[in-house]
Amino acid sequence: MKQNLFTIVNAIGCLVLLVIVVLQWQQSEHQREAYRTIQIKEHAANEAKAEAVTRADALMLDLTELKRSYMETQKTADAAGLDYQRKLEELGTTKAAYDQAAAERDALQKRITEWEAALKLRDQTITEQNASMIALRKKLDEAIVQLKKAGAK
């Protein structure tokens, strides 16, 4: 009986050990599944991080390019503003010169008109004096003819 009892206790012990091994195996499988899930999540997180870093690098590159472009645009705008101011000053100078030239032209036209009137008056006076001299010459010629006649008599 002792041997029977020992076999039964041994069988019960084997069953208990079998239950313990099965429980540990199930627990190990659950832990392995949990570990695999964590690995998958970590891999996805690493991929997302790598993608975010790549995107951040691209955005930083874009930002640097945008800053450079903005600075070039600002320089161009400043140069255009300076050019505009210079052109505006040139326009003011040119307008002043134009106004002065127009005033001088008007003054010259007025003087030319006055000279033309003075020349017409002079020509008229010369014509009148020429006619007067012709008349005087006629009188002188008549007087000379009369003196010659009187001297011949």
Image (spheres, rainbow, N blue to C red):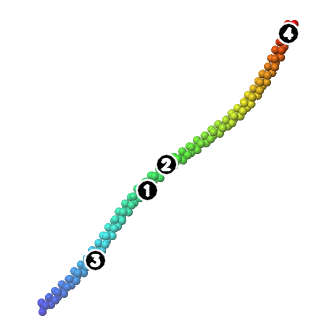
- Which quarter of the picture shows residue 114? top right
What is the three-letter code of the residue carrying label 2? Answer: Lys
Mark 4 touching mark 3, by CB under 8 A?
Answer: no
- Tell me which label, 4 or 3, sits earlier in the chain: 3
Residue 1 position in % (x across, y down): 12, 92
Considering only vertical position in the picture, is 144 above or below 52?
above
Binning the other alpha carbons within 10 Å of mark 1 as few (below 14), some (14 to 19) or many (20 upward) gives few
- Tell me which label, 3 or 1, sits earlier in the chain: 3
Residue 27 position in % (x across, y down): 26, 78
Q: Which residue is mark 4?
A: 149
Q: CA distance from mark 2 to mark 3?
A: 66 Å
Foreground mark, 1 or 4, reads 4
Binning the other alpha carbons within 10 Å of mark 3 as few (below 14), some (14 to 19) or many (20 upward) gives few
Q: Which residue is mark 3?
A: 30
What is the three-letter code of the residue carrying label 4? Answer: Lys
Binning the other alpha carbons within 10 Å of mark 2 as few (below 14), some (14 to 19) or many (20 upward) gives few
What is the three-letter code of the residue carrying label 1? Answer: Leu
Considering only vertical position in the picture, is 7 above or below 115?
below
Q: Which residue is mark 2?
A: 75
- Tell me which label, 2 or 1, sits earlier in the chain: 1
Of 112 and 4, nearer the camera is: 112
